[in-house]
Amino acid sequence: MTFLVSRHLHLFCSLLFCLRLGCAYAERVLATVGTDVTLRCNYDSRFYGKLAVCWGRGAIPNRGCAKEVIKSDGTSVISRLSERYLLMGKIGEGDVSLTIRQVEESDSGIYGCRVDVPGWFNDQKHEVTLTVVPGRPNPLKVETKEVKERTITVRWTPVFDGGRPITTYIIDLKNKQASWNTAVRIEVSNPELTQVTLVDLHPAKNYNLRMFAVNNVGMSEGSNVLIVTTKEAAPEGPPLDMQLEALTPQSIRVTWKPPRADLRNGAVRSYSISYREYNSAKRQYGRWQQQTVTATRELESIILSNLKPSTTYGVIVQAKTIAGTGPASTAPHCTTPDEIHKTSTAATMKSTSPAATVWLQDTTSSSFIADHTTSTVDTVTVTASTMWGQSTTIFSSVRPDPPVVELKEVKDNTISLFWTPGFEGGSPITGYLLEYKAVNASWDYTKTVVDFGHNQTEATIIEINPSTYNIRMFAKTSLGTSKASNVLTITTGEAGHQWDFLSTTASIDTHAAASVEESRSGHLVAIVVPVVLVLLIVAIVITWQLRWKKRKGSLNMWLSNGAIRYRGSLQEL
């Protein structure tokens, strides 16, 4: 009995304390930086009617609210510290919960809700402890800026970083049909970037691309997935299994198969068949003649007619896509039978090599170069059936000077470049071309070109396949394209390593990218002719000295270091 009286006395005292000072109910809420959070507070409006309410920061004092952030008269908000503080519930029905928009870590702390209930010591108090922690960045929104044969340029808009600075961007790239487990993952460690260019891709391929943002809390959810198809390019491989068969004194049948699937660089639309006479006695070729066959099946064929009897012909075949013509496949020469021997068995000859041995340009090209693979056939340079007329292009104004390209930063597999524009010439610069190729490849056939606007002076390139590359640039105006800039030679390492070699060389390619193409033979002659002249002069001088020494009866022999090692008569030698 004594125990029950003591317990009821304790409850009575607690109730009396609440009635005098008001009871404060505590609650804890956890929120992430950047989100909206609601702190609950309600009262019975049907019993009390509409009451005044205030919210403050810190413990609830005896009167009012400490560091008041918002206040209501029971019907609407009459004051607030910031637009971030809202009463979004039905105030007239007693829902006076506090909503804080886009909370920050500094919003952490105690919040107190005080409802002014009529009478002494009747106020309803409710305290909430809010803890705000940083989170992962928001997902990125990625979009395609430019797609070319071997490059993709993507860009994105900066997103909320979750309360911690973004340190890295991650790019996943994969074939469209493959799973994300097979994707190539590329880390971009410069958080200031909003655009990158991925290079060294395959033409006419379907890719999927997605991105992530990373801070020290974690990685964001994946961005939207881009579906990108690179543009077609000219084939890189020649037609396969080419065969020539002399059918009659006036005809030869040519058969072949398409290039390797991975070297077609797009859909093969047609084939160009070029043929010409070959005079083995004089080792001379005739003029090229051409025919075109639409690509329709795996084994293609054509019959060359109206040929000459007992005549040797050379034939080459090239595959064409919408982007251009690829290298040629060639076979040994085929000779038509003489008209007298109409019953003789036609000879069938198969190509000795399916590899690309000849580059044959379209009929608008300036020359054809046939490089046969068999030892019995010589390499010959001949003139195309369609020749360029000699002409001189005169510009009324000066074209621009090339820009000067410099390396800004190389980290992992990301190359950051910047360039300084040169003299504009007679017209404002309208853009820049960046050419990118493997160091052992030719600028003429295997380069990758990226366009930049006239107001851009820096770029970031992501290299998929580590190797050694050359980079150069051109400036463009309405009057033409500048000469090539200096060439950067960069050797990439494995993923996660620094680039181990960097050198800058002056450009030896002086032809403009899109306007004037100089002949390769001109460069060869410029090198060979002086060397031959020097050797000829040296031979003449040595012969003259030998004859003069012979008359004297002695000869001096020198080593490369200039010391005399032997002196004696010619007869002793």
Image: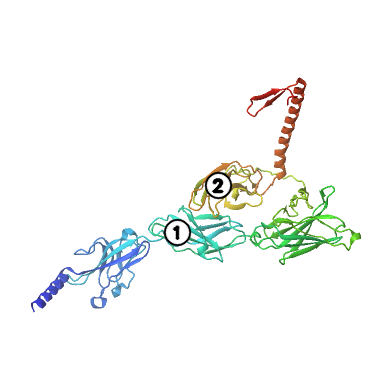
* Residue 342 visible in the current orientation: yes
> What numbered label is drawn on residue 213?
1
Image side of residue 227 versus residue 58, left or right: right
Disc nearer the start of the sequence (1/2): 1
Residue placed most toward the observer, 293 or 231: 293
Question: In the image, residue 568 lies at what x, y percent?
Answer: 71, 22
Counting other residues with Cα less than 10 Å from the Cα at mark 1, is it few (<14), some (14-19), or many (20 or more)?
A: many
Q: Is residue 168 above or below residue 78?
A: above
Q: Where does label 2 land, which residue?
A: 490
Q: Secondary structure at mark 2?
A: strand
Snapshot quadrant of residue 129: bottom left
Q: Secondary structure at mark 1?
A: strand
Q: How is the image coloured?
A: rainbow
Question: In the image, residue 100 lies at what x, y percent?
Answer: 33, 64
Q: Are marks 1 and 2 in contact (CB under 8 Å)?
A: no
Question: In the image, residue 390 lies at what x, y percent?
Answer: 77, 46
Residue shown at 9% from the left, 77% from the top? 5
The amino acid at mark 1 is Ala
Q: Is residue 410 above or below residue 560?
A: below
Image side of residue 85 versus residue 298, left or right: left
Residue shown at 23% from the left, 76% from the top? 48
